[in-house]
Amino acid sequence: MNNLTNSVIKAYVKKDGEIYFMFKVFIGINPLTGKHQYTTRRGYKTFNDAEMAYKQILLEIQLNK
């Protein structure tokens, strides 16, 4: 994934004016309710930090299947 081109990772501005990055990722379907489950991670100071965390979560999801 190229720098600043991952459509899952979004930039946002906090009240103090600082730019941070966040992402939302699908983690599976809840077996009890049948609903989709997502997790959101926020507060990354750089795009690369957010991208590394995103890839780590995807890897953990794949290993748990």
Image (spheres, rainbow, N blue to C red):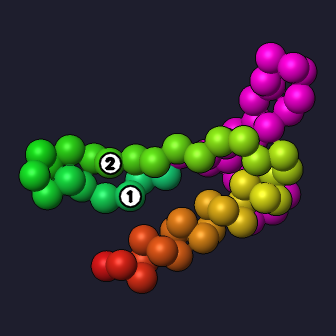
Query: Do the residues bearing badges 2 and 1 touch, measured as CB atoms within 8 Å?
Result: yes
Residue found farthest to the top: 15
Specify the amino acid type for callout 2: Gln
Residue 3 on the magenta span: yes
Residue found 85% across the figure and 32% down from its top: 19
Q: Which residue is mark 2?
A: 37
Left or right: where 53 falls relative to 40: right
* Earlier residue among tags 2 and 1: 1
Q: Which segment is the magenta one?
A: 1-24
- Toward the viewer: 42 or 5? 42
Picture coordinates of residue 3, whole percent (x, y): 84, 57
Residue found 76% across the figure and 47% down from its top: 44
Picture coordinates of residue 47, whole percent (x, y): 81, 51
Residue 3 to residue 23: above or below:
below
**Which disc is residue 27 wearing?**
1
Residue 57 to residue 16: above or below:
below
Residue 41 on the magenta span: no
Picture coordinates of residue 54, whole percent (x, y): 62, 60
Q: Secondary structure at mark 2?
A: strand
Instruction: Tell me where residue 55 sits by quadrant.
Output: bottom right
Residue found 72% across the figure and 60% down from its top: 51
The quarter in which the N terminus is drawn is bottom right
Picture coordinates of residue 12, whole percent (x, y): 75, 29
Residue found 52% across the figure and 44% down from its top: 40
